Amino acid sequence: MTGLFAGRRVTAITMTAPLVVIVIAFLGWPIVWTLALSLTNKAITGPTALHSSFIGLANYKELFASGSGLVHSIVLSLYYLVASAYIGQALFGFLLAYLMRRCPYPVRAVVGSIVVVSWLIPEIIAAWMWFTLLSDGGTLQQALHGAGVGYSTWLISHPMISVSLANSWRGVAFSFLLFSAALSDIPTDLIEAAQVDGANAWRRLSKIIVPMLSATILVDLVLITLGTLNDFTLIFAMTGGGPGTSSTVLSVFMYQQAFVSFQLAYGTAIAVVLLAVGAVFAVVYIRILRRQGALQVAR
Amino acid sequence: MTALRRRLPAVIVSLIGVLFLVPFAWLVVVAFQQHGTLELSGGGSFTLDHFGQVLHGGFLSALGNSLYLAGGTMVATTVIGVLAAYPLSRFQSRTQRYFVYVLVFLTGLPVVAIIIPTYDFFVAADFINSKFWTVWFMTATALPFGTWIACSFIDAVPRELEEASWIDGMSRWGSLLRIVVPLIVPGMCVVAVYTFVNAWGEFFIPFILLQSQNAPASVTMFSYFGQYNTNYSEIAAFALLYSLPPVALYLIVTRWVGQGFALTGAIKG
């Protein structure tokens, strides 16, 4: 019995070894190094590029001082989160999945495919499509001009609305698919029974459907929060964080400090803030999954 | 009145569908024009020339780089993920449980936040601008989720199937390769396609770690932002070709494995 156990252990270690090595080398080590770098004055160019020194919490003091731009970036990240993830993806995705159940098959198939394709194409292409759509002389300006409405590009006058619209369009499919699957799991006789008992559509939705979907809703909210807070490509490509700093969300702020202003160490201090937020939501996610019994993998 | 009410959802959903098509419209129309501009009309007559032009030179090598990165990440993630998922699914212990927690935790960590030390490390180790090493970094970012999905597929394979083979003297490696792997081929495809689609569209990692001749299509595409008075048709044709593989792969896998892409199943555990 012990021999078998020893064999099992050796097998388990051999099989997981490649995963462990790669994850430690390319994820674990960078996380530790992020924390370490944030306590130095390392830059990409100049005298501190090669000979950086330990400066304690100075980067954090600078970051949390007023006027650093951190608070501004946090507010913009929250705006992006609420507008594009919670309203544009979760709420809209839910409504779409809910309405879709009462549509004939052709409508479901066609609209469902369009929504999913917007999600499958590379993010940079989605960004380019929205960039050209909203640009001066773009399709939107033409269409509004035809209708007699003036338009000056939203990318400059309303950058946050522009990127939030684009991210809602691109990301709604994820919540939509999640909610569609969960809605189809609700037994139809349950809803029909409520209908017979005289519950109107609103009561059926609020008293039966939403409570039955609460687990899915929670998982969806946690996952899109993580995805949206760390989104970089769409905003960076469409507005570059501008004009000025009017769409500089946390991830773009970090990039600019580290790779445009060459303040590598200062950038990692911002990265630590991102890591901390990500860690909190990851722990919340684990707790939800544990409560649902989804993490008791082995039998 | 009731007939109208019954049709209302279909009308609303159809309208949403049309609105969702708007951003696609310009790209698709302009790709087939002679000299596309930002406007829909006035780009000249219908032509397929741009698709031919795009398959030469810089465009083609960018797509080749994307294929290298996405293909490499896909193979490495699927093989390493399934290998690690087997003991995680089969051997119950406290270590195994904590291991799964760590995997889920890493799934939630932002890649954006660890790019600076990775860049620093790639420069110091002279890995910068190396597609090979970029694949390993991308594999590391894809592995936590990939391994976790693979776990749920191996869980679904009954133990009894393997037990018979152990009595016949087959090793764990033998039963993994000869019994479990053939049964989870659809699951492995889900992991592979999910990883490929993500890596194919990845912009941030190659944007920081790769340059010029090693840059994938996403980074090439970025250089066209804000370039006015260019021939938009050529770029649009390139954008269409670059968007095609993820859509095609998704269609093939959903046809084969079933609707919902097992994505929702995997997330629910």
Image (cartoon, coloured by chain):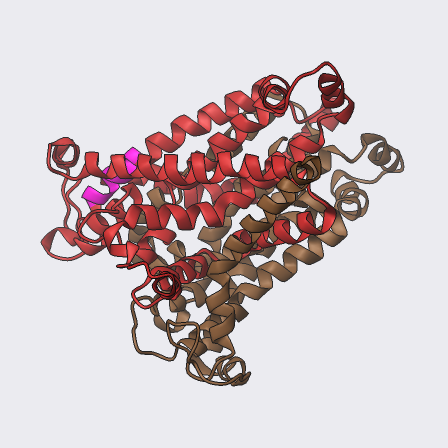
| Number of callouts | 0
Q: Indicate whether residue A267 is drawn in magenta.
A: yes
Quarter of the image where one finds residue A231:
top left
- Closest to the observer, A97 or B3: B3
- Viewer-proximal residue, B211 or B21? B21
> Looking at the image, which residue sits at the far top?
A197
Q: Colour of chain A?
A: red
Q: Position of residue B200 (x, y in %)?
A: 51, 59
Asked which quadrant contains residue A143, the reply is: bottom left
Q: Colour of chain B?
A: brown
Seen in the picture, residue A135 relative to B57 is either above or below; the reply is above
Identified at 62% across, 31% down, the residue is B268
Q: Position of residue A45 (x, y in %)?
A: 15, 57
B95 part of magenta stretch: no
Q: Quadrant of the C terminus of chain A?
A: top right
Predominant secondary structure in magenta? helix
**Quarter occupied by the N terminus of chain A:** top right
**A202 relative to A197, above or below:** below
Res B64 seen here = no
| Position above or below: A285 against A161 | above
Residue A108, position as x, y percentages in the image: 67, 47
Which image quadrant is residue A180 in?
top right
Looking at the image, residue A110 sits to the left or right of residue B107; the answer is right
Residue B165 vertical position relative to residue A197 in the rendered view, above or below:
below
Magenta span: A265-273
Q: Is residue A167 visible?
A: yes
Q: Residue at x 63, y 40 (%)?
A: B9
Q: Nearer the viewer, residue A233 or A119?
A: A119
Residue A271 image position (x, y, % from top left): 29, 39
Residue lying at 65% horizontally and 36% vertically, measured from the top left: B5
Q: Is residue B38 left or right of residue B269?
A: left
